Image: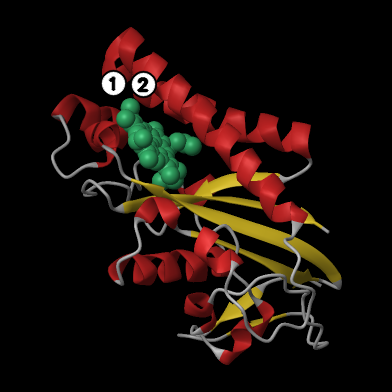
Amino acid sequence: MTHRVEVGRLGRHFRPTKPTYPTVWRHDMRALTLSAGLATLLAFGNAAADTAAGPSPGPEAPNPAAEEAKALIKEFAGTLKDELQGAIKAGGPISAVAVCKDRAPAIAADLAVRSGWEVKRTSLKPRNLALDTPDAWERQVLTRFEERKAAGEPADALAFGAVVDDAGTKRFRFMKAIPTGDVCLACHGKDINPDIASALDAAYPQDQARGYALGDIRGAFSVSKAQ
Ligand code: HEC
């Protein structure tokens, strides 16, 4: 039995079919507008959501896993940023392509081993299709992030967490959007230097992660752990 998530245009259903509902700690009414199926999902990570009141099947205490997820993502993001900046400074953006290719997955794997969480990055337009293609749940959350951004929320404030049923056990999943900054445009922007573009073509023949503008949602960190 897998924990595959079936996603319709707006709805979602978790398997197995036993109607187990996750414990819900906090509400984000924006997230709850997604569909009735979203009774199973809850938003975390947004300060504004902490105070939102509403009917809840669980206690109103914060989920400690959300705090752990945020700290983990902070460490992941900080390490990536340091290595990227170091690589660009040392050898320029072309050599930094190789650093991103080798180091980003290694940093995620190292954090996963140390923390016990599953750690990845994902995107609606991934560069590394093998590692970063979103699963159905992630795709839905990323789509919702785009909607929330279109409705005026800044990309760096977008986060979402939920406890989902994973083949009979509970799993906490948390995502945080990654905004496109200035430094990112060299490799993810609309007007990429031809030398960088050919380095990217060589490493990622199916690259979709170009054409972004400043402030766009480049993707998201996605972490999860059995509860
Ligand atoms: C030097 C080129 C370069 C720069 C600059 C760069 N990236 Fe990337 N980015 C890459 C490469 C290469 C990958 C694929 C890494 C891999 O194979 O795991 C990638 C992957 C990603 C991913 C994972 C999702 C995917 O598309 O596979 C995200 C998210 C991401 N980059 C965000 C950013 C952000 C945000 C910035 C700016 C802070 C940035 N990148 C700057 C080259 C770059």
Residue that carries the numbered disc 1 in the rendered image:
94
* Residue 96, numbered circle: 2
Q: Quadrant of ligand 1?
A: top left
Residue 222 location, x and y as percent?
58, 52
**Residue 11: percent from the left, percent from the top?**
54, 86
Which of the 4 quarters of the picture holds residue 187?
top left
In the depicted structure, whether residue 120 falls above or below residue 28 = above
**Label pair 1/2, CB-CB below 8 angstroms:** yes
Q: Is mark 1 within 8 Å of ligand 1?
A: yes
Residue at 74% over, 80% down: 15
Percent of width and height locating residue 83: 46, 20
Residue situated in front as seen by the camera: 89 or 162:
162
- What secondary structure is found at the residue carrying circle 2? helix
Identify the secondary structure beneath mark 1. Answer: helix
Residue 27's place in the image compared with 75, above or below, is: below
Assign the C terminus to one quadrant of the image. bottom right
- Could you tell me residue 53's position as x and y percent? 61, 79
Q: Is mark 2 within 8 Å of ligand 1?
A: yes
How many numbered discs, if any? Answer: 2
Q: Residue furthest bottom?
A: 36
